[in-house]
Amino acid sequence: MRYIRKITTVILVLVTSSFFLIACSDSPTDSGGTAKVQGQVTDEDGNDGFTKPTGGVEGATVTMVRASSDGSFEAVSTSSVETDANGYFTVETDVENESNLIVQAEKNGMTWRSVVTAEVQSDATVESKPMTEESTVEAGVYAEARADGSADTWTSTSIKSNINASVATEVRGNTSAYADLAAAIQNEADAEAAALMEISNKSQADVDAIAEAQADAQANLESNLYAAGSSSAKEQAYTDFYSSVEAGYEDEDVNDKERSKALSVSGKVLVESASNLDSDVRTALKQKSSTEIAAAMDDAVQAQLNTIGASQNTVQAAADANAALQTRIESAQTMSDIEAAFSTYHDSVVAHTQTAAESNANIQSSVVADIDSGINASGGAKATLDAAIQAAIATGINVNAIVTAYTEFFSAIRSTVESSFSTAGSAEVEAVTDLLILANISV
């Protein structure tokens, strides 16, 4: 639960959510009864704060549409409806067995949209999260992903995870930016899937199961946000969401250290893929990825320190260092600020590993420091990783090459640790390896 608590208090000011999604069903059908979607049109900028929308938009005309393969919006509702005095509506469609339909509202030249993750069913009602500027941009980016043919099982939830109110303000109405974001987010999803299969030896079926769990969590979040009548209810909605996200990984036997590594790979791919976007947008994307990585790292680092016999004071000091890392990421104004925060955290993790090693006869503190220095030396494993990434992005983004570069980086650290601590048990070698990897990865 430590991970869930930290995510709730930190990520909520950064992002609306986590990186997987469910796409349109391959075989939607028309039914005898109608499917209903209820929601609210608001004048709030986004859904990532803790306040209930204060201003519903009355008298907006609402329809239901789907994003077509050419990026346009095709009407699928039986008729249009108008929002009530508080901006609420219920709109109907004859379509069923289809997810990621879009509710669309218009008034006085303004248009709002929101992608509905839940699958619509005949004679059933699902909910859209409140329509805002943020949800409108998410829908625009999703439409670009559909047009590009990349709106697969990952895309919608991943888009919602990456686009917050700040990003939305920067790119709204810029279709070129929408396309760039869609491509970057798809690359991120591909990278995380590939990293999970490579690092955690997961099958495509395992990865698909995680994606489905993420989509279910997102659909429940949207329903709960619609119903939330208070700040505490909205906070609880996000707490439940992150709990479900974590459970999705755990159900497929992906632990925190494996997730930290996979998120570092995918986060790097996301930021590098967004090179055509404004620096403020790239900073927001890096902030989102870094927050998720830091939260996953917390329990992972503590677990590895416990494995090598660290005292409770040392483990608590590592937890405090991670809390400071998350605070600095949250307040960062530039990508350099985030990098500096991780640099400080690196020093802390290495120092705590050395402290733990002092009471472990099989692990020498000075050798831990030497290995880390070698990793970061000119020509060391980190320099090799950076060079490989630069080669992989020189003429476009080669996702597989970046995943391979990280895999080789992890293997190089493991080989060095194994040869340096020949008397240590396998669990201790693995723990020191993972501590040095976690200390040296960031977006």
Image (spheres, rainbow, N blue to C red):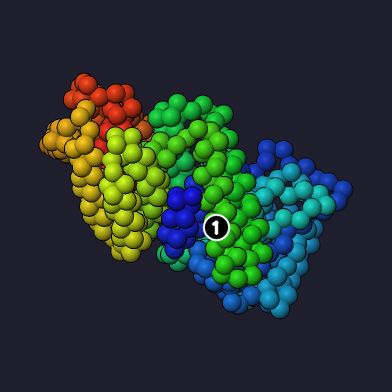
Identify the residue at horizontal 28%, vertical 32% (top origin).
433
Q: Secondary structure at mark 1?
A: helix
> Where 106 sits versus 412, above or below?
below
Q: In the visual, does 259 lie left or right of 325?
A: right
Whole-percent x, y for residue 146 in the image: 57, 45
User: Is 93 or 425 nearer to us in this picture?
Assistant: 425
Whole-percent x, y for residue 364 in the image: 17, 32
User: Is 232 or 291 nearer to us in this picture?
Assistant: 232
Which residue lies most toward the right here? 32
Identify the residue at horizontal 60%, vertical 45% (top origin).
215
- How many dots with numbers? 1
Quadrant for residue 240, please give it. bottom right
User: Is 7 or 100 nearer to us in this picture?
Assistant: 7
> Where 11 sits versus 59, above or below?
above
| Label 1 CA crowd tier, 10 Å (few <14, some 14–19, many 20+) | many
Amino acid under label 1? Tyr
Q: In the visual, does 37 lie left or right of 169?
A: right
Whole-percent x, y for residue 192 in the image: 44, 38
Residue that badge 1 annotates: 238
Identify the residue at horizontal 28%, vertical 27% (top origin).
429
Residue 208 can be seen, yes or no:
yes
Residue 174 can be seen, yes or no:
no
Identify the residue at horizontal 62%, vertical 46% (top origin).
216
Whole-percent x, y for residue 237 in the image: 58, 59
